[in-house]
Image (cartoon, rainbow, N blue to C red):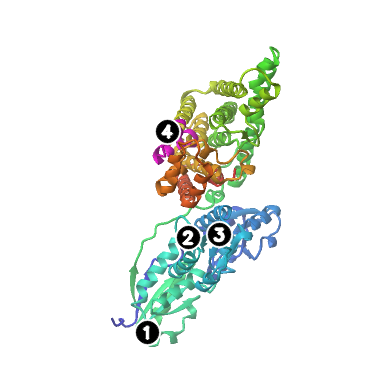
Amino acid sequence: MPSAPHRVLLAEPRGACAGVHRAVETVERALQLHGAPVYVRKQIVHNEHVVRDLEGKGARFVDSEEEVPAGAVCIFSAHGVSPQVRDNARRRGLTVVDATCPLVAKVHQEAVRFARDKDTLILVGHVGHEEIEGTFGEAPERTVVVGSVEEAGRLDLPPGTSAAYLTQTTLSVDDTAEIVAVLEERFPGLTGPGSADICYASQNRQNAVKAIAGRSDLVLVVGSANSSNSVRLVEVARAAGADARLLPDPDLLDPAWLEGVGTVGLTAGASAPEVLVERALRRLADLGFGDVETEVTATENVTFRLPPELEDAVAPAGADGGAATVRERAGAEEETCGKLLDRVDRRIGELLSAEEARWSTVDPRVAVPVAAVAELVAAGGKRLRPLFCVTGYLAAGGAAADEDTVVDAAAALELLHAFALIHDDIMDNSPTRRGVPTVHAAYTDLHARRAWAGESRRYGEAVALLAGDLALSYANRLASRLTGPAAQVWHELVTEMIIGQQLDVALAAEVEPDADLARWVAVCKSGRYTIHRPLALGAAVAGRPGLHSVFEAYGVAAGEAFQLRDDLLDAFGDATATGKPTGLDLSEHKMTLLIALGAARDPRVARLVEDSRHADWNPAELRAALLASGVRAEVEERIDALVADARTALADAGLPGHWRLRLEELADMVAYRDR
């Protein structure tokens, strides 16, 4: 169809995406908060016009964090940075503001996971691009970069190598699909991300260019030469059959380009501001192309929140008339959190020491169960439940007057956890916990070495049962000051944890790989008890039980991710890192969600689960079948989705920005831990 004379076909969507808007506003807000200069590592986005504008406002762009004066404000660009850069910034005492696009941050998160679980991570992207440099830095020793179909064809990996791939967010969708297809053909079993890495903005702009290219004699792409997504748009237009040129500045539009052209397609890369498109339209109008038609292929309504420390530039004035920055408030409240957790440890230690001394006056043997609890608590542990309880309390604005109550509540949670672990180790027949013998194993061994009367195993389990009972008794004692909604949360927490354990035992005995029931167990006996209820308990102590629904949505998602990670660590983890033997879920017939999903997708896994009813079955064979089934990748994808759900639950919760960020970090911590 012939082109209409002297017409502009304007692509929609085009231009700056949500990540670019966020990055630019981050620099502007940092200048307002800290004053000029602030230092930006690399170009905040790949557009010369944006960089010049921000320089005029007081931003200073540097190539390395090493060029930033010690203690100054350093902003990381939207393209992300490596862990080494973050370490350097900490070492130099820089005040870091992270403007990394959330979609790039997602790729970093996936890189950490794949580097942990795979022999090789393949990054599809361009060597030297800042985004690839940052992602590569997550695991440089096991990462390779592939930039073309030819490079994918030449890539040489040792036989049996487990590999995964990730992609740069700004690539051509079509070119990337070709590269991935070659990799998948050459390396069977190659794992990819749970969802596409190429960002929505790049995809939308490429689709829009395809829509206008077939109707255009020339496509102009407004964008800088170092903008990967802008260069990709030129390539996409040419691949669709149109002549295409990159236009870094509208003043550079050469009238000679328009000779013999009837229709000009116009778009802009995801880092180009709309003001440049407007200037290009005026320039085209001056050259006789004043008729503009917009081609809409998608509607974008995505927005990203600013880094938490910038969401509110200044806090309300205090009694001294001064103004405290959000960063200062965040630091003070993190310090308060640490002090409260220290008090929790002291509270537990003082209680158990007093009880051990009290009962030792009757007879040293009477205090044995108390000592067993004290030894387990002292052996370490993650203290997740106290951490979430105190975090919920502070995020809800807990007052100093209630600190004693929240300390007791958090200490009660840790002792409840000790009760659960001691009894769980008996039920699981686990020989070690936190790198030392479990209570029942230690006292079974003691009985045998002393050659006492009766069965050594029964003696060890009896001591452990009594120690667990005492831990529960002490937990309830500490929780006795809780009233109203806080008391309700406590009682529900204790009950559902025990009920969940009962179903866990029943499913193991019946060898019933039911995914829905396995998920219910994971949420009930672990997820709610580890994250949701402790957060809700802290908020209730602070007098804000209304946060319960927010903490439930966050806690159930993060808690299920926590339990799924536990399942993976048991099946495939390293015992030296976890502090307990791996494979117990398999050998003890636990019907975890991992096993239930594996049985559903692979008949061999289902058969081996059924065979576990027989005395001569081989747990190692089931583990190998699980690994071969691909269910591990499925569970990792489920964990990614759950972490995303947890973050979404916080988005509009009305929590202070730094506490929202802290909870997001905690979701990552519990979901992607290695022990």
Residue matched to label 4: 510
Where is residue 466 shown, x and y percent of the image? 58, 20
Q: Earlier in the sequence, mark 3 or mark 1?
A: 3
The 10 Å Cα crowd at callout 2, few under 14, some 14 to 19, many 20 or more, is many
Q: Nearer the viewer, mark 4 or mark 1?
A: 4
User: Is there CB contact under 8 Å for labels 4 and 2?
Assistant: no
Residue matched to label 3: 160
Which label was assigned to residue 552? none
Task: Using the image as rendered, state which of residue 653 and residue 323 is in the foreground.
Answer: 653
Q: Nearer the viewer, mark 3 or mark 2?
A: 3
| Residue 360 placement, left or right of 264 | right
Q: Would you say residue 522 sits in the magenta stretch?
A: yes
Where is residue 233 shown, x and y percent of the image? 45, 72
Badge 1 element: loop
Quarter of the figure that contains the C terminus: top right
Amino acid bearing label 1: Val
Q: Earlier in the sequence, mark 4 or mark 3?
A: 3
Task: Using the image as rendered, state which of residue 210 and residue 12 is in the foreground.
Answer: 210
Q: CA distance from mark 3 to mark 1?
A: 55 Å
Amino acid bearing label 3: Gly
Residue matched to label 2: 197
Badge 4 element: helix
Q: Which residues are magenta?
A: 505-527
Task: Using the image as rendered, state which of residue 491 and residue 622 is in the foreground.
Answer: 622
Q: CA distance from mark 4 to mark 3?
A: 36 Å
Residue at the image point whose x is 52% and y is 23% from the top: 482
